């Protein structure tokens, strides 16, 4: 059986950002002030004219008081217990080529259980998130291939294949792949 390409979640993300903003009674200016993302960019995202970067999604989810993974999960809601590889939503950062595969069954995400995410970070790439993106979750990072340099506030962790790091208190974080080949790691999340 040939695998089918994963659906592009951009439109679902656009709709979800608007729903989250409007459900709070916030204007575009309110969300821009709370997230540090420009009104123009938020407007483009909500209209589906721009695919948000990982950094922008991190800022928006922090402003909403949601985990980034929860914001994406809400955009792709379903009630399933089995997550087949070919059906797992994959999102790609248009700026860096970073990809994020939601491995966990979607019902597990909405039910508050553990969530597993597989990330492929291309070579010579940095992705940064504000501390607000980590405020509502416990997180572990398990490196599968390549080397990941993880900057957690002032701490710098160099993780080799097989290494697993439990994150500390929320801090600004940067994921760095200084190598030439992609680094693949699994993120396990549990809501606080």
Image (spheres, helix red, strand yellow):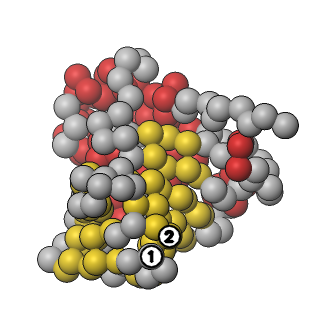
Residue 91 on image: x %, y %:
49, 40
Residue at image point 23% right, 70% down: 151
The answer to whether any part of residue 129 appears in the image is no
Residue at image point 39% right, 46% down: 98
Residue 86 on image: x %, y %:
71, 43
Residue 37 on image: x %, y %:
22, 37
Residue 171 on image: x %, y %:
25, 70
* Circle nearer the N terminus (1, 2): 2
Compared across the picture, whether 45 is left or right of 186 comes to left
**Along the viewing direction, whichever of 138 and 31 lies nearer the viewer:** 138
Compared across the picture, whether 145 is left or right of 158 comes to right
The residue furthest front is 180
The answer to whether any part of residue 161 appears in the image is yes
Q: Mark 1 and 2 residues: CB-CB less than 8 Å, in contact? A: yes
Position above or below: 17 against 85: above
Q: Tell me how many marks there are.
A: 2
**Along the viewing direction, whichever of 67 and 32 lies nearer the viewer:** 67
Residue at image point 74% right, 36% down: 3
> Which quadrant does the N terminus fall into?
top right
Position above or below: 42 against 90: above
Residue at image point 23% right, 61% down: 178
Crowding around mark 1 (Cα neighbors within 10 Å: few <14, some 14 to 19, many 20+) is some
Could you tell me how far apart the alpha carbons at marks 1 and 2 are, in whole angstroms? 5 Å
- Residue ID for mark 1: 161
- Residue ID for mark 2: 144
Crowding around mark 2 (Cα neighbors within 10 Å: few <14, some 14 to 19, many 20+) is many
The local secondary structure at tag 1 comes to: loop
Position above or below: 173 against 80: below
């Amino acid at each position: 059986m040939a695998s089918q390409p994963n659906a592009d979640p951009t439109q679902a993300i656009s709709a979800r950002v608007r729903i989250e903003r409007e459900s709070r009674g916030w204007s575009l200016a309110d969300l821009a002030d709370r997230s540090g993302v420009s009104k123009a960019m938020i407007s483009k995202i909500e209209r589906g004219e721009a695919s948000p970067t990982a950094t922008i999604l991190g800022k928006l989810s922090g402003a909403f008081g949601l985990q980034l993974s929860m914001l994406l999960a809400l955009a792709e809601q379903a009630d399933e217990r089995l997550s087949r590889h070919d059906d797992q939503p994959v999102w790609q950062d248009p700026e860096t080529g970073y990809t994020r595969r939601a491995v966990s069954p979607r019902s597990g995400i909405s039910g508050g259980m553990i969530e597993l995410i597989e990330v492929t970070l291309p070579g010579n790439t940095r992705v940064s998130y504000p501390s607000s993106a980590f405020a509502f979750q416990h997180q572990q990072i398990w490196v599968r291939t390549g080397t990941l340099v993880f900057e957690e506030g002032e701490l710098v962790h160099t993780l080799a294949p097989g290494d697993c790091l439990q994150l500390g208190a929320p801090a600004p974080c940067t994921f760095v792949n200084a190598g030439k080949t992609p680094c693949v790691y699994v993120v396990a999340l549990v809501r606080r």
